[in-house]
Amino acid sequence: MAKQADKKPSFFAGIMSFLSWCAVLLLWASAAGIYLHPALFKWVQLLELAFPLLLGFVLLCFVLSLLLAPRRAWIAFVGIVACIGSVRDYCPVNLTSPPPKGCIKVLTYNVMGFAGWEKDADGHYVIPAYLVDSRADIICCQEVGSGGSGYDDVFGKFMPSKGYYADTVNANGNILCCFSRLKITRKQVVCSGSGNGCGAFWLLSAPGDTIVVLNAHLESNHLSSEERSHYQNLIKETDSLENALSGRSKQILAKLADAAVKRARQADEMIEFIDSVGRDGKTFIVCGDFNDTPISYAHHLFCSRMTDAYRATANGIGRTFNRNAMYVRIDHIFCSEEWKPYACTVDRAAVASDHYPVSCYLKRGGK
């Protein structure tokens, strides 16, 4: 009887060790994927997308180990601690710190064609009115669209009447705009792809002092509404092998992998542009719709050079795309080392577009 009693804990210990190590190794592989260029390792991006699911699996193993085999709980615990940086990238935890005097406010917003120039009950364009009410000093918008009476009213009359300079760049059909209380002295297309890309705007903050703002809308996954719904079911029905191996699922996964390669190359071009422009008398702000999660090559590339305002100051996952199963942060604000960010937030009350706006405060000479 004593031998049978000894075998029971040994059995659970073996099972939990096996499950924990499997979960931890997959989590580590997902976290390490950010160091691999998608052009060389195309399918790694899919493992990066699974990071929150794998993290949840490791946490489950930790809890089960505490209940069934306490001496094996260290495996899951060490697994999480070893990639705590990636956990903070995805879901940061920070002490709140109100912005001090002397900050500028930066806002980025994928406006989805200004929501078809939707108007409120008072006859005001909803999104432009929101932008003015935000009191941001620098506003970067993606998917602006072009032409029409709404466009002419907003860019020619409304925003200038509120004290904003307004200018746009055309990145292969995707209009990117900058509204700024600082004078826009120059603009340039940094990179472009199949309807996506990045534009740069030079803002004059003082004589001889220029802020270069990069407004990016990197390669989309190009998933239709039906495909996003299928992807949502694929995420939720993780126990359905038939669903995971279906032809539609493979097609969606291939689209995700191909788009990741294009985004990585666009991110490389943006970094090359920053290096070529140089930092002599210039500071940089990079923001926009990256279509990439915090666990991705593109996000890591900018984090290695700049500060992610959300990671440094905000709390929680910070979902910015508000459709289907994309419960992730794909809109980002980065700043060069001359700036210190404060109070980065995602405004989930702004529902006119399929993205939520992201804003933060930046203080010069904060580091």
Image (tube, rainbow, N blue to C red):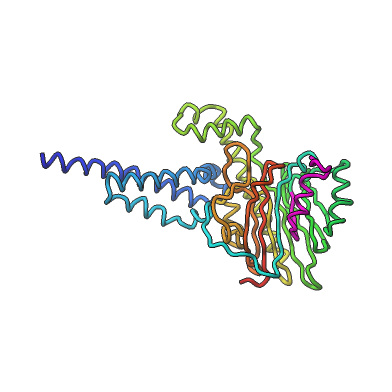
Residue 314, given in percent of the width and then of the height, sits at 57, 57
Q: Is residue 124 magenta?
A: yes
Residue furthest front as drawn: 122
Quarter occupied by the N terminus: top left
Q: Quadrant of the C terminus?
A: bottom right
Foreground of the two, 26 or 37 = 26
Q: Residue at image x 57%, y 47%?
A: 38
Q: Can residue 35 be seen in this view?
A: no
Q: In which quarter of the image is residue 200?
A: bottom right
Q: Residue furthest left?
A: 1
From where the camera sits, is residue 93 visible? Answer: yes
Location of residue 313 (image quadrant): bottom right
Q: Which residue is drawn at 63% across and 71% down?
A: 366
Where is residue 116 drawn, in percent x and y?
79, 38
Check if residue 31 falls in the magenta segment.
no
How many numbered marks appear? 0
Instruction: Answer with left or right where residue 49 lies relative to residue 68.
Output: right
Q: Where is residue 72 in the image (x, y as percent from the top left)?
A: 29, 50
Magenta residues, start to end: 118-141
Which of the two residues, 32 or 179, is positioned nearer the viewer here? 179
At 68% from the left and 43% from the top, the residue drawn is: 351
Point 46% across, 34% down: residue: 238
Q: In this view, does 139 lie to the left or right of 165?
A: left
Nearer-the-camera pick, 64 or 16? 64
* Residue 181 at x, y percent in the picture: 80, 61
